[in-house]
Amino acid sequence: MNNVAYLRPEPQPVSDGVGSLHDVQAIEAAQPDLIGSISSTYDLLTQGAKLYPQAPALSFFLRTQDHQRPTVWSHREWIGKITQAANMFRQMGIQRDEVVAFILPNLPETHWTIWGGEAAGIVFAINPLLEPSMMAELMNAARPSLLVTLAPTPGTDIWDKAQEAARSVATLKRVLTISPLRYLPGVQGGVLSQLASWRRPRSIGSLPVSDFHQCLGRASKQQLGFTPPSLDDVASYFCTGGTTGLPKIAVRTHRTEVANALELSAAFGQTMQGAGKTLFCGLPLFHVNAQIGTGLTPWSAGAHVVLGTPQGYRAPGLLQQFWDVAAHHRFIFFSGVPTVFAALLQSPPKGQDLSALQYGVCGAAPMPVELFNRFESETGIKILEGYGLTEGGCVSSINPPHGPTRVGSIGVRMPYQDMRVVILDDDGHVVRDADVEETGVIIIKGPNLFKGYLNPAHNLGLWVHRPGPDGKLQCWLNTGDLGRMDADGYFWLTGRKKELIIRGGHNIDPKMIEEAVHAHPAVALAAAVGRPDAHAGEVPVVYAQLRPGHEANAAQLLAHAQQHVAERAAWPKQVIVLRALPTTAIGKIYKPALSLLQLEDVVQTEARALGVPLDHCKAEQHPKLGLLVRWRAAAKADVLRDRLSAYTFRNEEHQG
């Protein structure tokens, strides 16, 4: 059994971090064995807790206005809570191959569920913003035995959705609920938390519902009461990717997560290592960025995380007061997506002491060059743009923390990962490595790779084989992303195969159009998607969100785009200005929603041109059929049906 001791261990070799590809190679040469004796995420957290046991590990505030009075756990207390959670889950019957699902906002208990759950079994993160039907379908695919979710709480519908979904999941044996009201300051928090406990539902049908904290209190926090997992045991399931049907479920091992955390730590070096080094977590904990980048990695190095409200960046007032929060807690680092950086520019720093703040790390989606330059110019904070996939742990490349940033680049590969650009044939086989500056498909290899998708059918075309130094074929992950590498080892994304707009056989990179529109001074965000076209297959259109206080109409933006997009075939046919672009729960622009708008508009436009009166027209993302338009005409339906047959998108005449 793992015995949690709190004596400070012998100091480990500390990397000075990455300033160039040469540093990556030097780190690998100096310490060839990345993982060493670490056996699991729990073991990594335990070793990290030994470094500075009395130093703060996590600070949490429930509301933005409470940020100066957070609830704080030391590293000793933090690993104790994770140990308790692990023992609690095992007492409830969770074995190594059984699944604990969670539908939770950002709470300390979410982390206890993640890391304690991985010690006992397998943890499955589910986006709380999903609809109950989608939650149920995902759980039925993953087959969890236990669900951890939010107790009924004013201002959120998580409980309502989770309990509805749980009724349709036959494998569930128990539900645990957590009330965030305990974190309200003063007497109010205790009273409301107690009231919430009394009002907690005791069952969902025949499924028992228990209070998380009551069960946690009956488990030991001193040591694991069972054999801990090993590196090749499955640690987690994550939903990932996919604009058609249900998201794929990625199966990740302890090796996946331990390796990527150690790779990140090596890349940042002493910047992120040690007591008093404070990072901010505002991205949702159902996403790998928050779990690995602002969770496992800093705690493995004895650092401190500030978890800002259950809603993260979406919390009322947080983005508006972010610089005050950053100054008070002395952040050295925060991670966000482009929409977060754009929002922060609407409330720029005003004299706060941000001398500790070194980096804003941008991942999950490419940052427009204009936004990048504008943010650094107006805040003075260095942006590190990186790249990664759920299938690769979290991060595979980053602009060097201790070296030059190349705007628009996703940086150099992480230590201990290999990353190449290759040319594939039509069957998906590697033909050769791409030349310097030649565009191809990005592939990655390393100890951080996941095991594969839960559904074996999703693994088709996932792996490619490339000869190693000894001539033997090695297995690599095909990311599906298009990119190039320059002479200094910096990678540049040039598009994604599934996002390419294909106009009459001409492949158009939407990023080219978006960058041009972003260059207009009135534009905050832009997203280009393909509009179905009966002759060309697709034509590009652009959606734009304006900066506060700026004005521009669609005609002006269209003219600007045509002046700045070099390829005539890539000129957008239309610019649509929206008050706000749709985003995912982590703040990425959600292009499928824009594609649905275009599908509906195509059907409506054709109907008007034909004089067909429509009673109903709705595009949806069908779980099995993908993008689909259902329509109903009051008359002349056969005329519209015949016209729509010229398009490639799926459509159905709605009979309801």
Image (spheres, rainbow, N blue to C red):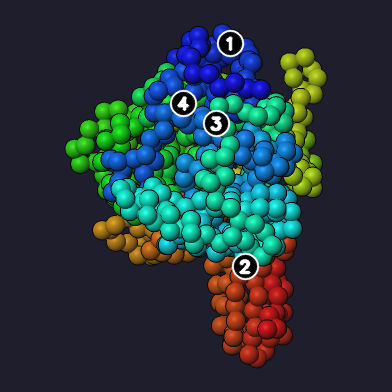
Residue found at x 56% / y 22%:
4
The label number, if any, that marks residue 76 in the structure image: 4
Q: Nearer the viewer, residue 638 or 357?
A: 357
Q: Nearer the viewer, residue 550 or 113?
A: 113
Which percent across, then down, holds residue 111? 52, 39
User: Is there a contact, CB below 8 Å, between mark 3 and mark 2?
Assistant: no
Q: What's the amino acid at mark 2?
A: Glu
Tell which circle, 3 or 1, labels the residue nearer the N-terminal end.
Answer: 1
Dot 3, crowdedness within 10 Å: few (<14), some or many (≥20)? Answer: many
**Mark 2 or mark 4: which is in front?**
4
Dot 2, crowdedness within 10 Å: few (<14), some or many (≥20)? Answer: some
Secondary element at image label 3:
loop
Specify the quadrant that holds the N terminus. Answer: top right
Dot 4, crowdedness within 10 Å: few (<14), some or many (≥20)? Answer: many
Residue found at x 64% / y 79%:
631
The label number, if any, that marks residue 620 in the structure image: 2
Tell which circle, 4 or 3, labels the residue nearer the N-terminal end.
Answer: 4
The label number, if any, that marks residue 221 in the structure image: 3
- Please indicate, yes or no, whether residue 409 appears anywhere in the rendered image: no
Q: CA distance from mark 3 to mark 2?
A: 48 Å
Please give the residue where the numbered disc 1 appears in the rendered image: 31
Q: What's the amino acid at mark 1?
A: Gln
Q: CA distance from mark 2 to mark 4?
A: 49 Å
Q: What's the amino acid at mark 4?
A: Arg
Q: CA distance from mark 4 to mark 3?
A: 10 Å
